[in-house]
Image (spheres, coloured by chain):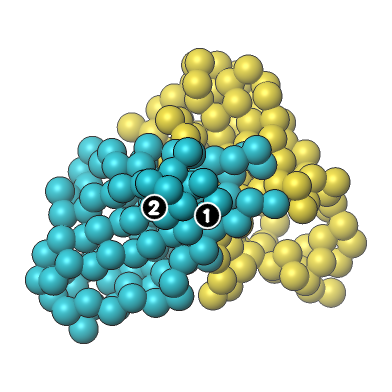
Amino acid sequence: QITLKESGPTLVKPTQTLTLTCTFSGFSLSTSGVGVGWIRQPPGKALEWLALIYWDDDKRYSPSLKSRLTITKDTSKNQVVLTMTNMDPVDTATYYCAHCIAAAFDYWGQGTLVTVSS
Amino acid sequence: SYELTQPPSVSVSPGQTASITCSGDKLGDKYACWYQQKSGQSPVLVIYQDSKRPSGIPERFSGSNSGNTATLTISGTQAMDEADYYCQAWDSSPVVFGGGTKLTVL
């Protein structure tokens, strides 16, 4: 049974750096073809893909946010960490992590709401 | 950058067939998938690789992808299918989501 859970601060101030952790179980991020992605959703708006890391440590980023994002993995801890710098109120959203296989995100975490406000 | 376009809303009567489209340049050359998101919940994958259904997804959900358009079809739509639906494709970015379609079952 695959599960993922996001954790991190619920409130950050403008200009601060956001660090989110995705802790998962039921799969290994060292298995060929597997990836973990981050997707966010501002309140009442559409899904937006942020970043993706593969089993072989290949990393991909949204072109519009690439300069602000870093994704890393700790295979031994079954965790993926996303950092986003220079947070702004427009970054207020629910942030999801998801298991990626066969060109789709087939398991999603419950999401964590991050509010950016002074 | 690559874009996927969905109609903002689609309405269907219970028991009828709902079709939700997703348009993008040469989308048929890429894999498309679809997610269902009910209010306050995380998205659920309902179609992947254009037309495959994950385990546990009812057979009334089907997908196709050709030319510039991918289509999610829900046959015999039920009230429980009322939700937002998002298409997603892989490009050089590599991941792109559509803007979402709100399906209303009247």
Disc 2 target residue: B70
Chain A color in figure? yellow
User: Which residue is at a point 47% across and 35% down the rendered structure image?
Assistant: A103
Q: Is residue A39 left or right of residue B70?
A: right
Q: Position of residue A105 (x, y in %)?
A: 46, 41
Location of residue B90 (image quadrant): top right
In the rendered structure, the residue with mark 1 lies on which chain? Answer: B
Q: Is residue B36 left or right of residue B14?
A: right
Q: Does residue A64 appear in the picture of this structure?
A: yes
Q: Name the mark on residue B24.
A: 1
Element type where label 1 sits in the image: loop
User: Which residue is at a point 13% across and 75% down the rendered structure image?
Assistant: B14
User: Which residue is at a point 86% across and 67% down the rendered structure image?
Assistant: A14
Name the residue type under label 2: Ala
Check if mark 2 and mark 1 are on a common chain: yes
Q: Marks 2 and 1, Cα distance to the nearest angstrom?
A: 8 Å
Instruction: Point out the tag, 2 or 1, that comes first from the N-terminus.
Output: 1
| As drawn, A109 above or below A46 | above
Q: Is residue A34 left or right of residue A21?
A: left
Q: Position of residue A30 (x, y in %)?
A: 55, 16
Chain B color in figure? cyan
Name the residue type under label 1: Gly
